[in-house]
């Protein structure tokens, strides 16, 4: 009962992953979930999520639903400090925990595993790539490209880096992923959808991933700027209104750049700083969390 399931950060690849572009997701142990039997005020909400899963799954699914039901009646719940509506994989951690504890028979591996986790998570989102629960389940990073995944021995940690600084900016706005994704998919179906620019965005994400993992800070900065500019132009709905001004200021010569972190609409924004001390001053009105890349 002591195993923990980390949050995940989708550093690069948001939305572009739906066009088979590369994506990088890493475990983020600043937030985590674990099973508990203790009494707490949060227990009811957690049990409601577990009950939703129990009610949504077919009797012949991969989970031992009878055992899950018995444990629920006995008081089990998933204790978690992963904020909901922030794109940190709160439902993914729940799926990972449920599958690890309640899977029937031998657990799936490889491609079958991600498909299985995606199927379970559909109970929450109606649609799932399986990436969120897979990162939490494996407790390792994931590089995803054209339907193929590569497991990475890296994770994201809180703390200042001795390289160019990535950071999270807390918008303190919870949001729902599904409506934002649906809006994007509807836009993709329109005749005037900017395919050329979306291809540029996918290429910038790919460059950012290779530069970040390869510790090429100058290349990372160039790729991050292109992502920030393209998202500012084409993803206005996903940028919270109160943060559009500072996003623009970053592009116009600030010490930082901003991009979406996940679906957008709230939660965290991901930032890149060329001068961390200056950025802290320029964004002193906001909660900033510095990030560093660590080895597992």
Image: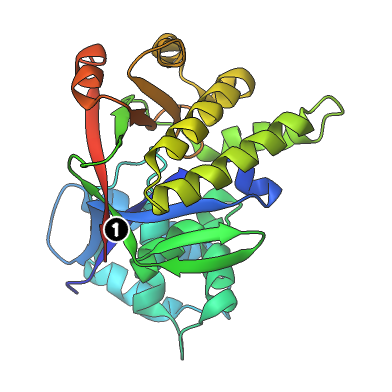
User: Which corner quadrant of the image does residue 102 belong to?
Assistant: bottom left
- Judging by the rendered image, the residue that carries numbered circle 1 is 6
**Residue 184 x/y as whole percent:** 67, 34
How many dots with numbers? 1
Q: Nearer the viewer, residue 9 or 78?
A: 9
Residue furthest toward the bottom? 105
Task: Specify whether residue 262 is in view.
Answer: yes
Secondary structure beneath dot 1 equals: strand
State the residue at coordinates (46%, 84%). 107
Q: Percent x, y for residue 167? A: 29, 34
The image quadrant of residue 274 is top left
In the rendering, at what x and y percent does residue 93 appear?
36, 59
Q: Which residue is drawn at 55% across and 20% down?
A: 232
Viewed as shown, does residue 73 lie left or right of 61? left
Q: In which quarter of the image is the C terminus?
A: bottom left
Who's the residue at 25% across and 12% down the image? 282
């Amino acid at each position: 009962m002591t195993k923990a399931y980390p949050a995940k950060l989708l550093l690069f690849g948001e939305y572009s992953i739906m066009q088979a572009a590369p994506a990088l997701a890493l475990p983020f142990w600043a937030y985590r979930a674990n099973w508990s039997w203790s009494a707490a005020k949060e227990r009811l909400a957690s049990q409601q999520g577990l009950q939703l899963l129990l009610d949504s799954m077919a009797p012949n699914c991969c989970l031992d639903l009878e055992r899950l039901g018995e444990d629920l009646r006995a008081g089990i719940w998933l204790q978690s400090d992963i904020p909901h509506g922030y794109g940190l994989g709160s439902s993914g951690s729940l799926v990972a925990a449920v599958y690890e504890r309640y899977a029937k028979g031998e657990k799936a591996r490889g491609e079958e595993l991600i498909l299985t986790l995606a199927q379970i998570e559909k109970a929450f989102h109606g649609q799932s790539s399986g990436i969120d629960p897979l990162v939490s389940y494996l407790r390792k990073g994931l590089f995803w490209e054209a339907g193929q995944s590569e497991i990475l021995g890296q994770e994201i940690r809180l703390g200042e880096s001795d390289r160019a600084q990535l950071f999270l900016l807390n918008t303190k706005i919870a949001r729902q992923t599904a409506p934002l994704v649906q809006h994007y998919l509807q836009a993709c179906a329109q005749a005037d959808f900017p395919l050329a620019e979306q291809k540029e965005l996918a290429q910038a994400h790919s460059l950012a991933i290779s530069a970040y993992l390869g510790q090429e800070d100058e290349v990372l900065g160039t790729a991050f700027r292109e992502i920030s500019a393209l998202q500012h132009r084409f993803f206005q709905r996903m940028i919270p209104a109160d943060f559009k001004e500072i996003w623009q200021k970053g592009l116009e010569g600030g010490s930082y750049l901003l991009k979406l972190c996940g679906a957008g609409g709230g939660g965290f924004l991901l930032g890149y700083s060329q001068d961390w001390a200056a950025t802290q001053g320029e964004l002193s009105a906001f909660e900033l969390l510095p990030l560093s890349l660590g080895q597992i």
